[in-house]
Image (spheres, rainbow, N blue to C red):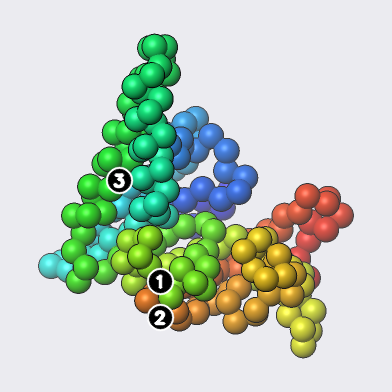
Amino acid sequence: EIVDGLNSTAPVYFVAGNWDYHVFDTMTGQIERNGKLIQAHGIEILTTPQQIQRGSDHFWLVPYFSYNLNQEIEKMVSTHLATSTDNEERQRNQQILDYQSSLLQTIHSIHDDEIQIGLMHIPLTKEELDDLSDFPKYDLVLAGHYHGGQIRIPLIGALYVPDHYSPKSGFFPDNKFISGLYTGKESQQFISRGLGATSVVPWLKFRF
């Protein structure tokens, strides 16, 4: 219903959130059943960096990518591939290696002077926005996940966001960081408050 209501004449790109199951395999990049339903609405699922061209100019839409995580995955899968004798397991491991290698090659092919917009669900941390050594050179990150706190008290702000990296485990977060634009030392990030609400406790599933 949300997708049908966009009525956009511009290209629409999708990244998976917490509850978007069976959209695509994050290890192999293969589109799964719910992803095919999304694609049927004319939406592109952002599994690899995409160049957006406008006349003679362009920029890149880049999904979440960590160099360290990429290396860990390749190392782990290469070890399994060298020891496994199961054909199905070997095939999947090879698909993972091919996808991770392709991601790395594409990101390396983007020049530093080209504009890169990171499109992801979970925001980067303040520390990561100050030091992008583990990430592509994002000029801007667009993210969500926090819902602006979902429950906000006048004069106080948000009570909680799902951010386990924060000093208070997400309670009483810095309101300057959890929605809108925040500028770090190396990149800036815009966090949308999004739509709807979520909670593991059903009676807290509302916005206030």
Residue 184 can be seen in this image: yes
Say which of 164 and 55 sits in front: 164
Name the residue: 45% across, 81% down.
Answer: 183
Lateral position of residue 20 relative to residue 110, left or right = right
Kind of residue at disc 2: Lys
Crowding around mark 1 (Cα neighbors within 10 Å: few <14, some 14 to 19, many 20+) is some
Say which element carries label 1.
loop
Q: Earlier in the sequence, mark 2 or mark 1?
A: 1
Say which of 5 and 129 sits in front: 129
Query: Distance from label 1 to label 3 (Cα)?
Result: 21 Å
Which residue was labeled with disc 3? 103
The answer to whether residue 206 is above or below residue 101 is: below
Which residue was labeled with disc 1? 131
Quadrant of the rendered structure where residue 87 is?
top left
Say which of 45 and 136 sits in front: 136
Kind of residue at disc 1: Asp
Q: Earlier in the sequence, mark 3 or mark 2?
A: 3
Which residue ends up furthest to the right in the rendered image?
Answer: 203
**Where is residue 115 shown, x and y percent of the image?**
26, 69
Name the residue: 52% across, 57% down.
Answer: 121
Which residue was labeled with disc 2? 185
Say which element carries label 3.
helix
**Contact, mark 2 vs mark 1 (Cβ under 8 Å):** yes
Which residue ends up furthest to the left in the rendered image?
Answer: 56
Say which element carries label 2.
loop
**Where is residue 208 shown, x and y percent of the image?**
78, 70
Query: From the viewer's perspective, is the residue at label 1 or at label 3 nearer?
Result: 1
Total numbered circles: 3
Lateral position of residue 149 relative to residue 13, left or right = right
